[in-house]
Amino acid sequence: MTEFELISRYFAAQSFTRDDVRLGIGDDAALVRVAADSETAITTDVLVAGVHFFEDADPSAVGHKALAVNLSDLAAMGAEPAWFLLDLTLPEADTSWLQRFTEGLFSVARRYNVQLIGGDTARGPLSIAITAIGRVPEGKSLLRAGARPGDAVYVTGTLGDAALALADRRGERRLTAPERAALRDRLERPLPRVAEGMALRDLASSAIDVSDGLLADLGHVLAASGVGARLTLGAIPLSATYRARLSEVGWDYALAGGDDYELCFTVPPGQPAEIDALARRLDVPLTAIGEITSGRALEIYDEAGRAYQPKGQGYDHFGSASAGTSAG
Ligand code: ADP
Ligand code: MG
C-alpha cells in the first residue's frame, strides 16, 4: 500500500465535512473559514508508543485517546473544537492496526463534531501527534491566570479513576474484574469536558484540564495566577469504585494520579446556584473542593483539620523516573 492509498483509505474516506471547511485532506494545505468575532485556540499533543501507551494497547483506544487529550486542552480554554491535523509515524502499513485506530479516532471526531483536515504520514517508530483547533468568542477564553483569592475551586466528574486503573494494569494494585471493567474507560477512553468548558466561559475565572494530576495541574493555575489554595481532602469527588477502595489505596491517585481529563476551575464567590444549575443541565458533578488564598501555598486539610501531605505531586516526563501514560 502506498502512502497515498493509506491516506485516502483510512483518513480521507472516513472524514466527514463541516460547513466551515473549504478544503480538507488532499491539497497542500487545508482551508477553513474563521468567524470575525472569535479567537482561534490551537493545541498539540504527541503520543509515543511505549511512553504514553502500551505497545500492545487496543489501537481503537489509542485513536480515541490521541484525539480526546487534545480536545481536553481546548475544553480547558473554553473553546469549541472544530478541526484537527494528524501526524502519524508508523513502522509499517499495518492495515488491521490502522482500521482499529481510525475507528477510535473517528468515533471521538464524530462525537465532538471535529473534522480531520490534514496531516502527515511517515515511516518510523509508532507515534501519533495531533493538532486540534477550536474557536472561542473574543475575550471569553478560560486562562490559567485568572484565579483570585476568595474564588471557589471546583472539579468536574471524579478524580483518580484512570490512575487506579493504570496501577492495576501495571500490577501495583489488584482490582476485581467488575472494578476493572468499571474503570477501564476512564483510562482508555476519556471523554473531554468540552460542553462544560464552553459553558464555563461566563462563570469561571480560570481553568485547566487535569492531565498530570490535580495537584500538579492546580499548581499551574496557582503559579500563573500568583495565588495559593486550600483544599478539603474529603471533598475531592471519587467514583463509587474508588470510594469502596479508599481506606486501602488512599487519596493519592485522586490527588496526584494523571489522565483524568476532568476540568479544574475557579469561580468568583457568590455563584454556587449558577454552578448547581449548570451541573444539572449538563448532568455532570461539579464539586467545590476548596478556595483560592492570597498565599502561594497549596494546602490540603483532612476532616480533623490536620494538614495532609500527599506522596506524589503529579506526573512529570523529565522529573520522574516512573513511566506513565499521561499525554497532556
Ligand atoms: P505534502 O507532500 O504536500 O506534505 P502529503 O502527501 O504528505 O502532502 O499529504 C497529502 C494530503 O494528505 C495532504 O492534504 C495532507 O494534509 C493529507 N494527509 C497526509 N497524512 C495525513 C494523515 N495522517 N491524516 C490526515 N491527512 C493526511
Ligand atoms: Mg506531507
Image (cartoon, grey):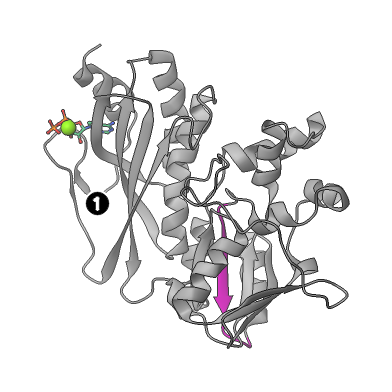
Q: Examine the rendering and report whether any part of residue 288 can be seen.
A: yes
187 or 226, nearer to the observer: 226
Residue appearing at x 44%, y 75% in the figure: 224
170 or 116, nearer to the observer: 170
Q: Main secondary structure of the magenta part?
A: strand
Q: Residue furthest left?
A: 28
Type of amino acid at the residue the image marks with label 1: Asp
x and y, in percent, of residue 50 in the image:
48, 30
x and y, in percent, of residue 62 in the image:
48, 32
Q: Is residue 267 part of the magenta span, yes or no?
A: yes
Q: Is residue 198 left or right of residue 270?
A: left
**On screen, residue 244 above or below 165:** below
Residue appearing at x 24%, y 38% in the figure: 118
Bounds of the magenta segment: 261-270
**On screen, residue 292 above or below 199:** below
Q: Is residue 150 left or right of residue 41?
A: right
Q: Is residue 36 part of the magenta span, yes or no?
A: no
Q: Is residue 232 left or right of residue 247?
A: left
Q: Quadrant of residue 165?
A: top right
Q: Residue furthest top?
A: 1
Q: Quadrant of residue 34?
A: bottom left
Q: Quadrant of residue 170?
A: top right
